[in-house]
Amino acid sequence: MTVDGKHKIDFLVLGGLHMDDFEWASRQYEAVGYVLVAFMMDCDGYHWKAVYVKADQLMEAVQKGVLGDWQERRKT
């Protein structure tokens, strides 16, 4: 929980991935408690970005729309 009383959601955004890097990244981040929740093509049309959320916070992140908010913040 943060100082202002809001829950903190831990998430990672990895960029510059090739499609075959997802297998490696999944093993690395799942081992420390993160799950893949989204992936998208980077603006270069060649690399991918992956979004991981801490597994024990996944339901809270989905219910609060954290990933949707992240997408909106990215546009600004």
Image (cartoon, rainbow, N blue to C red):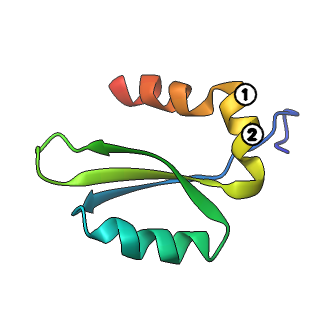
- Quadrant containing the N terminus is top right
User: Which disc, if any, is residue 7?
Assistant: none
Tag 1–tag 2 contact (CB < 8 Å)? yes
Front-most of residues 22 and 4: 22
Residue 52 in the image: x percent, y percent? 53, 54
Left or right: residue 2 compared with residue 71: right
Residue 57 in the image: x percent, y percent? 75, 48
User: Which disc, if any, is residue 63?
Assistant: 1
Whether residue 76 is visible, yes or no, is no
Q: Residue at x 26, y 52 (%)?
A: 48
Q: What element does badge 1 sit on?
A: helix
Q: Residue at x 11, y 51 (%)?
A: 46
Q: Residue type at mark 2: give it.
A: Met
Front-most of residues 50 and 9: 50
Residue at mark 2:
59
Q: Residue type at mark 1: give it.
A: Gln
Left or right: residue 59 compared with residue 28: right
Q: What element does badge 2 sit on?
A: helix
Q: Label 1 neighbourhood size at 10 Å, few (<14), some (14-19), many (20+)?
A: few
Q: Residue at x 44, y 22 (%)?
A: 72
**Vertical arrangement, residue 5 with respect to residue 44, above or below:** above
Between the C-alphas of marks 1 and 2, the distance is 6 Å
Whether residue 15 is visible, yes or no, is yes
Residue 41 in the image: x percent, y percent? 23, 43
Q: Label 2 neighbourhood size at 10 Å, few (<14), some (14-19), many (20+)?
A: few
